[in-house]
Image (tube, rainbow, N blue to C red):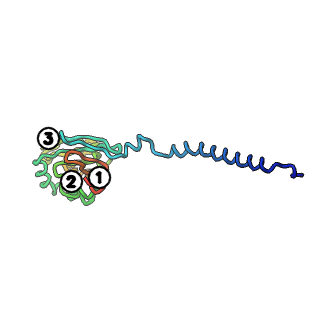
Amino acid sequence: MNIEGVDKSKRQFLTTALTVVGAVGTGYLAVPFLAQMQPSVKAMAAGAPVTVDISKMETGQLLRVEWRGKPVWVLNRTQAVLDTLKSLDNELSDPRSEKSSQPESSKNPYRSIKPEILVAVGLCTHLGCSPTFRPEIAPHDLGERWKGGFFCPCHGSWFDLAGRVYSGVPAPTNLEIPPYRYITDTQIIIGESAGDKSA
């Protein structure tokens, strides 16, 4: 084969042009493929921290918010509730929350940063049902032992108003306390630990 008449500059130009077109085409294919691997805006928002304003909460009031697709309760406890919590240790499975999930800032008898404000994930630790808020003392359907708390109607688990589980019920551990911190005296961020950023 005679290659003396071949124009090498045209061959080089065509090779370079095809390489560039191939690279651009690969880029066009790769961008949507890589983009679909990113979490959706909805998914990112579901995992994002949630800010809760507690400035208008009345004593005894329970707020319900959603964080990471889970119900989270914010309860403004009365002094009477705080006093009652101290008397329940003998009724509870894990009164000091040694086997339960809570951040370091909530490892105390109240399971909270500030004693009066409880922040807890509102899912029973047995099978994930959402317990009912029952603040009344000794209602006819729960009896004299009931000092107010969260009752799971699915299988009968009892939790006190610090989210601690009673002995002898199906739930194995206390309610989960999520990471949270105060950004002001009346604003809480759920999803960030107290040590994450300075309040």
> Mark 1 to mark 3: distance in Å?
33 Å
SS of the residue under disc 1:
loop
Amino acid beneath label 3:
Pro
Q: Is residue 78 visible?
A: yes
Q: Amino acid at mark 1?
A: Pro
Q: Residue at x 10, y 48 (%)?
A: 79
Query: Residue 64 falls in which quadrant of the image?
Result: top left
> For residue 190, which numbered disc appears in the image?
none
Q: Which residue, given by chain and number where applicable, does mark 1 sit on?
A: 179
Determine whether, in the image, residue 139 is placed left or right of residue 29. Answer: left
**Mark 3: which secondary structure?**
loop
Residue 191 drawn at (x, y percent): 31, 49
Residue 135's quadrant in the figure? top left
Disc nearer the start of the sequence (1/2): 2
Which residue occupies the foreground of this view, 69 or 47? 47
Local crowd size for mark 2, using a 10 Å CA cut-off: few (<14), some (14–19), many (≥20) = some
Residue visible at 18% across and 54% down?
110
Foreground: 9 or 191?
9
Sequence-wise, the earlier of marks 1 and 3 is: 3
At x 16%, y 52%, the residue is: 115
Q: Which residue is mark 3?
A: 139
- Across and down, in percent, residue 41 comes to 42, 41
* Circle 1/circle 2 CB separation < 8 Å: no
Residue in view at x 70 percent, y 49 percent: 16
Residue 133 visible in the snapshot: no
Question: What amino acid type should be assigned to the residue bearing mark 2?
Answer: Ile
Front-most of 195 and 68? 195
SS for callout 2: loop
